[in-house]
Amino acid sequence: MDPNTPQPSSGSASGTPLPESVTNALMSIQPRYNSFHQHHAMPHMTSGNSYNPSPGQAPGSVPGTTSNSNNNNNLQPATTSVINLSNSSDVVIGPMTQYQGSVTIYQYMDATVEATRIASGRNNQSRGLPSPEHSSVLRQERYFLYGALILFTIIAFSTALYFVINQSQSNSSPSQPEILFGNNYVSGTIPNLGNGHLVIDRQNWGAQSETRGPYPLQHPTPYVLITHIGVQSTPCVDMYRCSIKMRTIQDAAVAEQSLPDISNNFYLGGDGFIYVGRGWDTANAYANHTLSVCFMGDYVRYEPNDKQFSALDHLLAHGVAKDYLTKDYKLVAHNQTRTTRSPGPYIYERISKLPRWSPCGTPGYSACGAEIGLPTVWAQDYPKKTVTSNHPPTVNQADV
């Protein structure tokens, strides 16, 4: 008997019916086992390798079953066939093929058909994999998405940083104080006309405190006179140098020209600051009913900068707002009122394009100030009189 053939246990002769799962397993053993060896056994093993039924079992019958004489096709489980397994491992019910040694598996295919499938991408598609063209498109879309996200992040970060910086600057910058011009211009702080144009009063630039012009300036003033220093004067570019220049101009006016004070009402430095000369309330050395503004430097040789003209705009706008100037004041150059090179061609070229500039004193026009009784020539020739009373003398038109 084949040792691999399972044998029914000898101690199971009881009439207990077999479970259905065991019955089905026993019914499939003999046909599958004999069929496998009949077709796959080697020639020298064709005999004696079929399954041998148990003693007393009919040939062709399934172990563990009995045949019915009335119907041979109906197999009934034998009440005496039971397989008991205990303390067993690697138990196989049915045929088992074991290979000893190495196994080589050959796969034959049409190379032409396979190459065509790979080239067209159908090979990957049949396996559920993307084709090379599809993978390239996906990769490009992914790179584009990553680039768009990075660009959006940079823009958002830059925008947020811009607003944060502007907000911090606006919070840290102090509000501009109100500009209050007094008669003596002595203040604890430096007024600011806006746009960085500081008003440097007489005390700040070191004026001689005892020097004052003798005549008051009537308000509102209808004329603004533009002059320059000249005499090859280099424009100053900071408060330190401009203050030195202001003291030098005042000393020259008092000592050399015998004037009571510096000539002009205001001076514009190259730093964009406004330096107070005689101020709003004292007449200048040229003509009454005029406000004289001097550009510090020689503008026959040098060109003015934009900060000086911006300071001029702020100063005159403040004068109109405070009623120091008439609403329709006229802007004239010094060379329109007398024979002089002041304020220089560079200044004249620019002020002649301003909306308030008047062509008076030029060929074909009447003299400047003729309508209010000013002389034809606005000369710097104050009468050298001694003031003996507390009230300044009344100025005559012939004196100015």
Image (cartoon, helix red, strand yellow):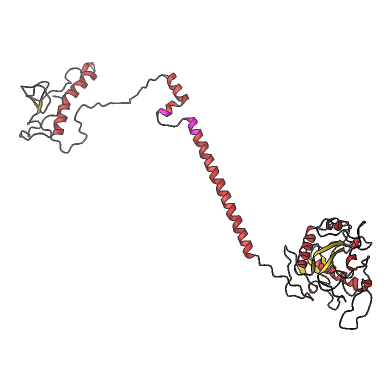
The quadrant of the rendering that contains the C terminus is bottom right
Residue 126 counted in the magenta span = yes
- Compared with 135, 393 (above or below) is below
Q: Residue furthest front?
A: 371
- The answer to which of 343 and 146 lies nearer the viewer is 343
At 55% from the left and 46% from the top, the residue drawn is 150
x and y percent of residue 200 in the render? 78, 70
At 17% from the left and 27% from the top, the residue drawn is 28
x and y percent of residue 30 in the render? 16, 24
The quadrant of the rendering that contains the N terminus is top left
- Compared with 161, 179 (above or below) is below
Q: Is 354 on the left or on the right of 65, as rendered?
A: right
Q: Is 358 on the left or on the right of 62, as rendered?
A: right
- Compared with 164, 139 (above or below) is above
x and y percent of residue 233 in the render? 88, 62
Q: Is 192 on the left or on the right of 2, as rendered?
A: right
Q: Is 356 on the left or on the right of 110, as rendered?
A: right
Q: Which residues are magenta?
A: 124-136
Q: Residue furthest bottom?
A: 389
- The answer to which of 208 and 362 lies nearer the viewer is 362
- The answer to which of 67 and 177 lies nearer the viewer is 177
User: Is residue 271 visible in this depiction of the protein?
Assistant: no
User: Is residue 288 visible in this depiction of the protein?
Assistant: yes
Instruction: Give the quarter of the image for residue 340.
Output: bottom right
Q: Main secondary structure of the magenta part?
A: helix
- The answer to which of 286 and 34 lies nearer the viewer is 286
Instruction: Give the quarter of the image for residue 40.
Output: top left
